[in-house]
Image: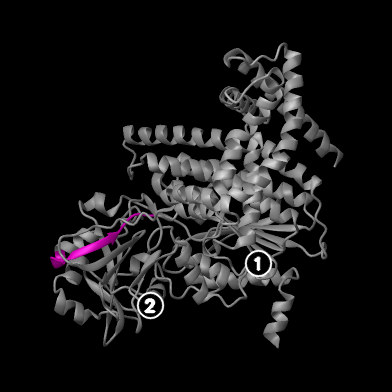
Amino acid sequence: MTVLRWGDLGRAVVALVGAALGLWIASWLVPGFDIGSWEGALWTALLIAICGMVLRFLLVRGAVLLGWVGAVLVGLFGQALVIWLVVYAPRGGDAADLGWALVASWIVAAVSTLFGWVATAGTDDAVTASLLRRARRRRHPIEDPDLPGVVFVQADGVPYPVLEWCVRAGTLPTLSRWLRSGSHRAVEWRPKLPATTPASQMGILHGTIDGIPAFRWVDRPSGKVYVANRPADAAAIEAVHSDGRGLLADDGVSVSNLFTGDATTAYATMSAIGRGQQTRESRRIVSEYLSRPAGFARSMSRAISEIARERFQAARAKRRDIRPRVHRGWSFAMERAALTGVIRDLNTTLVAESMLRGRRSIYVDYVDYDAVAHHAGILQPESLDALAGIDAVLAQIEAIAAVAPRKYHIVVLSDHGQSQGAIFADRYGEDLAGLVTRLTDSAAVASLENAEAAGSLNSMMAGGAGDDTVLARTLQRASARASDRITADTFETRQPEKEQEFLVFGSGNLGLVYVSGEDHRLTADELAERYPSLVPGLVAHPGVGFVVVDTVEHGPVAIGASGEHRVRDGVVVGDDPLAAYGSHAPEFVLRAATMAEAPDIYVNSLIDDLDEVAAFEGLVACHGGLGGWQDRGMMVHPVDFAMPDEMVVGADALHRVLRGWLEQVGHRTALREESAS
């Protein structure tokens, strides 16, 4: 403890000197900003720090009532107000000087952030130290301190081979240290079809993967299109599948997930947007983070840096003609900046707060790697840098665990892997909806854009909403309009001249084709009668590996260019179209194709000689179908937690393993007693 406090003292001195240096520079650049000598800069920096601590307490309380508008206002203007009070007000400054105080605050923030970054060798030590200081200030006694807790960290979309290579290369120092020291073990697990976050998270958190055929699908009885990262849809999906006994049902916390796992507390979780108390609590935590100079300045500087890096790296990829490659515009640059520059720290702050309160289990999703790899590629430097950022978060969580009121075990896992390849539309000059339209001479409405990464932005923005007061509701409408622009589903809706007959969705390299307005899944015979060229044309296309249709006689059948696999009976006629997709492919296809929600036609892309696929979305790396590394999930767990002898297959099976670990450390006793009775 003594060493830690000396370290805190050193970091406080670094912060003070950095702020003084920023004030000194501001005095040369900002009109009327006079602090005198260098000693005056140090005294001014100290006064600003003291005044800031007092004023921040009041500002955060106000920000809690205003949601995202309040949090951002505190971040933007809180430090400016402090500087105005310390520098301008004693000299008779008026409101007009607030503008110059704002300029000065940004100069101070930029210089002190840069100074702190250099002083900590470019690490996250400053952020960790801030969290540790809060831990010492806010002791939360708990009734069962001897009961260990578990933190589950989902590194979204990381394939097992990528983890293995990065650990060997030493680019993930925290995970490498754990594995090399023998405290943890790395294993591979196999998600079933579809290999996508909604199905995997539902399986991991709630123990079932039924009824979720992709990221989007049609509910035939109602005709509704479900999109998993829309709050209302996520809540409806969870309501159908939850039994109240999910992974986090025993004093658990969900952070930035699609579903809650029946957690008693859910921060920025899509299916739980609008829980009043947790919305207010998350606003408080986020507002406190943004109100600190290091918090807002760090987030903004990192966001700006990420935008610049993304634009440079995208241009470099184009100049070098890196392949496969997709267009990376400003919208993705903003998304990447938000995810890696802001959301990552906010998620970590929410996790740390939960640990410091002694919550028994916590599950958090970091989508940084998944989002960047979608656009850059699985092994591109920017993707691996995003993964290294998650590794740095693990070091922060480890440091928090050392001062938390209970011992914590840390488990790291991915919900699926990713596969790579040139997208279908680039390879063949038309997308899947265009192909369906050409083969049937019928109109199709398509959703072929990926909106998965936007889910984290959606949940964090919506999680800061609220309607606690009249003033808050007024300002929340402004927040909601900003949120709508960010969270709008990227549903690419085409308005054809003809009546729409097909709904075509892309989920990685898995395509879903629904005949519009039907109350049942059409059989192969019905499809052939209405659209005689559709299935044969899809099967014959060079970019299609196989299609799956239902038949009256044999049930679901996977059809390829030179053969078919009757997956219910295990009978192969001609060449097996599933042979290239792994030994689990028939089982996975049978399960997916017998769901009531299954489309009339599943379309899975080819897998080529480079083990690459062709996404039906605009992604260079994808997941959702079969082929490549998308069904190669990873997990790093403490060696004291036993794994089955055989590889875990299916997120529902992984749920049982994780639930067993919680029971092993003493959780879920009341739930087990209820089940026994």
Image quarter for residue 322? top left
Q: Nearer the viewer, residue 220 or 675?
A: 220
Residue 445 sits inside the magenta stretch: yes
Q: Which mark is residue 590?
A: 2
The front one of 41 and 389 is: 41
Indicate yes or no whether the magenta region holds residue 634: no
Q: Earlier in the sequence, mark 2 or mark 1?
A: 1
Residue 410, above or below 345:
below
Q: Residue at x 62, y 69 (%)?
A: 247
Neighbourhood count class around disc 1 (C-alpha, 10 Å): few under 14, some 14–19, many 20 upward: some
Residue nearer the viewer, 479 or 49: 479
- The reply to whether residue 287 is visible in this rendering is yes
Measuring 66% from the left and 37% from the top, which residue is drawn there?
A: 292
Q: Nearer the viewer, mark 2 or mark 1?
A: 1
Q: Is residue 388 visible?
A: no
The residue stretch that appears in magenta: 439-450
Q: Amino acid at mark 1?
A: Thr
